[in-house]
Image: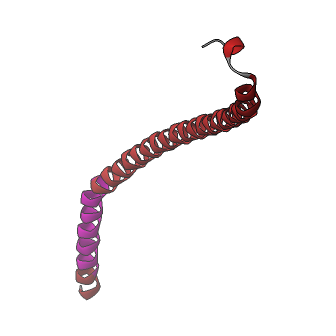
Amino acid sequence: MPVEKVPAWIKQVLMPELNEIKGEIKAVNTRIDSTNERIDSLRNEMNSLRNEMNSMRNETKTEISSLRNEMNVRLDSLEKRIPVIEEIMALKLKIADIEKKLAVA
């Protein structure tokens, strides 16, 4: 039914109510838009934090891998020295034994 055919008394009663409801709906829409903006902002912050965490995780993994490689190199170096140290100890014992024999003679 077109607005022109609505009786005047209905206009007087309903129009203020409808305008009030219209205003309330606009206010609700404004709050929804604001909430959506905050949600989008939080989503962006979470994505940024997720990216930072991934970056830090990758840096940590790289650092751990580097440290592991460095430790392996050092341990390999120590393992190579062990036979040399054993030989030096054997030579020291032989020298000590020879010195004892010479001291007795």
> In this orientation, which residue lies closer to the viewer: 50 or 73?
50
Q: Quadrant of the C terminus?
A: bottom left
Name the residue at 33% across, 49% down. Answer: 72
Q: Quadrant of residue 35?
A: top right
Q: Which residues are magenta?
A: 80-99
On screen, residue 54 versus residue 6, left or right, reads: left
On screen, residue 86 versus residue 52, left or right, reads: left
Display coloring: secondary structure
Q: Quadrant of the N terminus?
A: top right
Name the residue at 23% across, 72% down. Answer: 94
**Where does the image place residue 58, in percent across and percent down from the top left?**
45, 40
**Where does the image place residue 47, in percent across and percent down from the top left?**
53, 36
On screen, residue 69 versus residue 32, left or right, reads: left
Residue 89: in magenta span: yes
> In this orientation, which residue lies closer to the viewer: 100 or 45?
45
Q: Is residue 20 above or below residue 102?
A: above
Q: Quadrant of residue 101?
A: bottom left
Count of numbered circles in the view? 0
Q: Quadrant of residue 46?
A: top right
> In this orientation, which residue lies closer to the viewer: 79 or 48?
48
**Where does the image place residue 74, in percent across and percent down from the top left?**
38, 52
**Where does the image place residue 70, in percent across and percent down from the top left?**
41, 47
Q: Main secondary structure of the magenta part?
A: helix
Name the residue at 24% across, 62% down. Answer: 87
Residue 13: in magenta span: no
Q: Is residue 78 above or below residue 73?
A: below
> In this orientation, which residue lies closer to the viewer: 79 or 16?
16
Q: Is residue 98 above or below residue 7?
A: below
On screen, residue 63 versus residue 80, left or right, reads: right
